[in-house]
Amino acid sequence: MHRDLVFAINGERFVLSDLDPSMTLLQFLRTQTRFKGPKLGCGEGGCGACVVLLSKFDPITNQVSDISVSSCLTLLASINHCSITTTEGLGNTSDGCHAIHHRFAGFHASQCGFCTPGMCMSLFSSLINADKDNRRPKQRDGFSKITVPEAERAISGNLCRCTGYRPIVDVCKSFVAGVDIEDLGFNSFQKKGDGGDPFIELPFYSPGGLCTFPEFLKTEIKSSTPCQSLASGRWHCPQSIEELCNLLNCESLSANRVKLVSGNTSSGVYRELDLHDSYIDLRGIPEMNIIKKDNNGIEIGAATTISRVIELLREENRSTIFVKLADHMEKVASKFIQNMASIGGNLVMAQRDNFESDIATILLGASSTVSVMLSSEKKSVTLEEFLHMPPCTDKFLLLSIYIPSWLSSHNVLFQTYRAASRPLGNAVAYANASFLAHIQVDEKTGDTILENVFLAFGGYGTEHASRARKVENFLKGKPVNTSSLLQAVRLLRQTLVVKEGTRHAAYRLSLAISFLFKFLSPLTKSLIKPEENGRVAIQRGDKYSFTEGLMNGNIHDANQMLLYSKQKVELSTEHLPVGAATKKTGAEMQASGEAVYVDDIPSPRDCLYGAFIYSSKPFAHVKGIRLSSSADKVVSVISANDIPKEGSNVGACTIFGTEPLFPDSMVEYAGQPIGLVVAETQRFANLAAGHAVVNYSTDDLEPPILTLEEAVKRSSYFVVPPFLYPQQIGDFSKGMEEADHKIISSEVSLSSQYWFYMETQTALAVPDEDNSLMVYTSSQTPETAQNVIATCLGIPCHSVRVITRRVGGGFGGKAVKLLEHCL
Amino acid sequence: MHRSREPHLNTAEQRPLATRRQQPDRGEAVYVDDIPSPKDCVYGAFIYSTKPLARIKKVDFKASLASEKILTFISAKDIPENGENIGSATPVGTEALFPDPVANCAGQAIGVVIAETQRYANMAAKQALVEYSTEGLGKPILTVEDAVENNSYFEIPSEYTPTPVGDFSKGMEEADIKISSAEVKLGSQYYFYMETQVALAIPDEDNCITVYSSSQSPEFTQSVIARCLGIPFHNVRVITRRVGGGFGGKGFRSIPLATACALAAYKLHRPVRMYMDRNTDMVTIGGRHPLKVKYDVGFKSDGRITALNLYVLINAGITRDYSPYFPRKFIASIKKYNWSNLSFDVRLCKTNLTSKSSMRAPGHVQGSFVADAIIENVASVLSLETNHVRRTNLHSFDSLMLFYEGVNEEANNYTLPSIFDKLAVSPDYQSRAEAVRNFNYANKWKKRGISSVPIVYMVYCNPIPGRVSVFNDASIVVEVGGVELGQGLWTKVKQMTAFCLGQLWEDGSEKLLERVRIIQADTLSMVQGWITAGSTTSESSCAAVQLACNVLVERLKPLKDRLLEEKGVVSWDLLISQSVKEYVNLSASSLHVPSQNSAKYLIYGAGTSEVEVDILTGATTILRSDISYDCGQSLNPAVDLGQAEGCFVQGIGFFLYEECLTNSDGLLITNNTWNYKIPTIDVIPKEFNVEIINSGHHKYRVLSSKASGEPPLLLAASVHGAVREAIRAARLDYFSTSGGSQGSALTFDMDPPTTMETVKELCGLDIVEKYLVGLIK
């Protein structure tokens, strides 16, 4: 059974029955929806411009989880039953912006602006998660529960090339309840109080003010059962190992290019060289989602995301090893990658593609084991054995990872290391390492003896992370001192073999040595230890005394962000060819049919079509409009009620006055537009408008005035302004007196004429950014059209661009009878 | 696809909108790729050469799923008969769009694969099998040394040739000490604008075409497209509303993509969009000019320099592009110090590499850095404090005028000495320098350094057009030649318009700012738009608007005076509604042409940075940076502050992190976010103080203002200098244990970028073993 893919974007429901399973969420958003906020910056999860919020609902716990994800790597088919929020979902200029939007503007934190929507979503994700946390105390109004370090890290994986980040950090910090307003940088929110004291009035932030998961989707999820395939059978969701095996052994599938996916983040590292026919989503397999904790360790399913692994390890904070692993894993990729990437995927990349994985190295140092399935057979092997097995194929699956907690062992030392160009991660390390040692202190000598030691190194230019067994064996049972350390270092230099062609091989090797030195030197008595750094000598007299830290705090911690900034600015207050019989411009084109008229303009995506419903009564109250049942293709009906508050009901305007676009309640002539039916196609719109049933009432109304006689009788006139009233010549009465003959009260009457321009009235309106509008119209008076549209919508004229290239016949009928259609 | 809606916002407490000018953060701003694709739109992706000098014999595609998606392939053969094979043109040279048939560099676009979606096009481009032949083509030139050997140079037009100062040989005779044939090398840098190169071309009736391009130079783009298609310029409309970062990379390097896109659209009679993937962008676009300098310098024992001679080899890549302007800018920044006598031989090497183009502060950042590298070398040889040697060689006003001949400057506006003294020789600086020495004395595995950099930056102003019109409802619309790149041009122009029209009221009481709207650059609407580059386009656009506003003010003034007499009070709305009735022309255009006095000027600033390096890993932490920048009277301090900070951080990238590496064919291999690291939030200074100095009256400037878009980038060299000082401290330790000379400890080459591995190499890769061995002895 193939199911439809159902999800929500900014609260709107989307249903897709057929789709290319290789389509990314970003591609979908940008090409098939009106949400263009998420930007494509790199397509490999490395810049954050495409970050969106992905929310999931758990029908059992009734909880919504919200995570930031890279939409350029997220496959659309993988978001079934999810809700996506983009920066448009936070707010907009018409309905009101979100505090995040206001603050990015006010702190001058957006220059070219291309990174900003992603920045907003990364920050929003951090805020919403902090504010949902019930363990944290409630904060004062307008502030978040987020902490300064969290706020600063909220956007740590997002790249910006313009601002230098400082103003963005200030935006993030501005949400922290305890933030010293004085510490926030140069901004436009600063006001002067009555006493002349400056204070900052920040745009109000309301935690939890935005619903990220629509109720209709919750209801749908509650009534649904796990699905087996989506996208017309090109996206498989096996719910057990058996189903997976069946799929993998299925002939129709094996002839195709199939990809096994979890978060699909690996496509950011190993860019796909070709398309795939179908995908198998591994996230529904219970064995790959297992979480089992006991006193000796934790078993984690391979499909578990890295961010979930970090959470699990932190929950078990009794084990310092778990805490250190979690600390290290925070530096593996950006938050929006950790939220999608699976731990198993990372290890498989390390195993199959020689990915320089930090996770493989640190788990190796902690003596982890893995559970694998090889040709339908499950077995358990050490992580080191797994890494050195023949490369993973579709028949060789990683199911789970077991990490020992080492809680029952005493005197265990564990450390992990990495060196990368970015302290907070989002950069592959030049080298990484993790060391575990059991130590004992020799009571006589006071030396530290290494009873047992695991030394795992990776990323330095080797295929797989591995243990430096020679060095381990050498150190086992020895006291740690200058001599043993030197020999260990020398042995390590011989042991580590770097692949040919590795860049900076010597540097990477020296890092491995530095790591070992950092680990073991604190166990010696005589060496100057790296940890002792950061102390500064202050000269007093001729003596040096050592104090911890500098006057401006403990700023040598590279993990810490911008701590302080100051911005000081001073404010200070044209004959030939004229006359020649040249051809009409574009005449040939018009003859050949190349000329583009308004309705020839390609419809933009998401373009809707409108048709007027007009009154069939000359003078009546409109009680209601009912669309016939066949009108299910109608998107909306637009009437006078839809005119913006700041706008006015104007449909035409001449120097003598205006006329309303739509009647407020009363139609004054038959043929008067009452409203506009908007539908997916012009045909649907026309059909619906034609079938609309208008309920009129003529109660209490006088009969309509339909003839000149009637008008005269009832004195129904428009006043002709005196300056336009034709001049009389001479004296009529006097002239009559001079006449020989007279004809009295003879009559001539003339009837009307319809313009019958070949092109009927037409317009295409395209809404644009910043409340502006581009209207292509077939008009004789674009300027008037601009004025009327602006007045109707309540926006300045400069926000309305009216373009008239050619008119398919006008004859005056496209001067005042201007009809405007606004989408 | 069905949709239904449900209210998304529930309890949001949102305030009404105060202003509607800030769009990018809400994702409402429309960049080129955000423009809805027209019906029948297809997508293109470049296939590029992986060989530096080869004949393209054939382009085939692998049998694959992706190849099945190919609709067509556009190459040089598709250029119309009356068109030219032209992909870019600058005032100093043109280049071909596609090889016909010889590709001249790895990374040169060969053609465009067209498919139904951008993803299909990108994937299909990867399936290309290009058959090359190098028969009879000779060896490619990949390095400046190869270029010298083969006499492969671009000419530097005489009007752009920099001028020497004094007599070098005489100056050398006065020297106490000489350094000969020292070398400095500088690498390239990639723009890394967040929005990669993008264009959307829509063919229209009568051989017309509209091209939306993310470009700093719509006018140049228009002319190249027209020439390529063989149609008149007035058939080509290039529209640029906003650019998602340019940094010079969309000055000329954006033109080939826009042209290829237009060619495909013209040929296929369908809209074509091309949005380059990051990897292709990095590989094909080029970047900053790498260069190599050899110098001889003579100086007195007190650090005063008497003569400098430079031999500069600039790697310009395969086409002229912007390069002929480069030497003038490089030398202008070298001249920031008083070298007493300065001579040079600057060569523009033509190599089989992607063309190098202007990148933020082109030539200037290299020149300024080389000047400081020479000063640092002199200080090392003399064992003097580097900042002292810097101060000794700062210009007096007289020597400044000698070195910057033809620049109109007044003595009291030469603020550099006072800015530098405050940041680099003040008691506060001295006590910090002392604290750094103490820290280094007390710490073995971490070292600190502090250093300062002064800058003198010469900017050039270009002519820019503008037009200001007022509508019946008194709203104002402005068009200028300058493009909004994120640098705040629109903001400043808006302010300028409000100011100029507001002058009708002596008290400036009419608040016109929110009445002004700036509209996108449209080459059919505004001619002579030129290029947005060189930091001065904002002010020149403001100057153009000022001219146009003056015309309007002149037309409106008599009416305003009359109304004032009649009514006592006149509002903008009343004035305009009456003007409409009385048929006052409410639209004025202008072209601002800088006078000889204002065509170029000098900018000053200084920066001090303090860093800490981890000797064991080579990691650098920037503890603190202070920059001071003379902006004249800032047109908008928030914008100028943002430019200064952003620029500085981009400079940190150049000096510490960003490394452009090529394979043996000159093809860029650092071509993605995995191996090309621009600064992130965790590497910026831990303490970052910026001062925008509001200095006096500058009569030749636009409202006394000075530019801010590029010069502050040069100040990031202070970070590099501080790292050098920290490494010196580490080397003194290292050499004291290994018994080397102090000279070799202090004097060493340290060419940017100074990445982690460079720091560690300079500190000693075997430092741990050396230390342990030392203890055992």
Image (spheres, coloured by chain):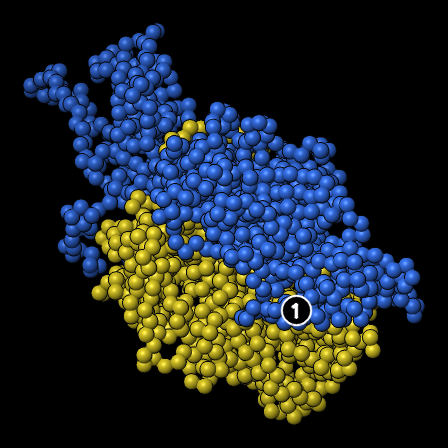
Chain colours: A blue, B yellow
Q: Could you tell me residue B579's position as x and y percent?
A: 41, 42
Judge whether residue B487 can be spotted in this image: no
Above or below B599: residue B688: above
The answer for which chain carries disc 1 is: A
Above or below A680: residue A31: below
Locate residue B219 relative to residue A347 in the image: left or right.
left
Q: Residue at x 9, y 17 (%)?
A: A743
Q: Nearer the viewer, residue A82 or A516?
A: A516
Q: Residue at x 30, y 18 (%)?
A: A628
Q: Could you tell me residue A617's position as x and y percent?
A: 27, 15
Amino acid type shown at disc 1: Thr
Q: Nearer the viewer, residue A496 or A605?
A: A496
Looking at the figure, which quarter contains the N terminus of chain B? top left
Q: Disc 1 on helix, strand or loop? A: helix
Locate residue B234 relative to residue A367 in the image: left or right.
left
Q: Residue at x 47, y 67 (%)?
A: B668
Judge whether residue A679 can be spotted in this image: yes
Query: Callout 1 environment at 10 Å: few (<14), some (14 to 19), or many (20+)?
Result: some
Locate residue A589 relative to residue A476 in the image: left or right.
left
For the image, the number of numbered tags is 1
Q: Nearer the viewer, residue B499 or A206?
A: A206
Q: Could you tell me residue B564's position as x and y percent?
A: 50, 40
- The residue at the far left in this view is A741
Looking at the figure, which quarter contains the C terminus of chain B? bottom right
Q: Could you tell me residue A472's position as x and y percent?
A: 72, 63
Above or below A473: residue A132: above
Residue designated by label 1? A495
| Residue B336, image quadrant | bottom right
Locate residue B775 relative to residue A344 in the image: left or right.
right
Q: Residue at x 81, y 69 (%)?
A: A482
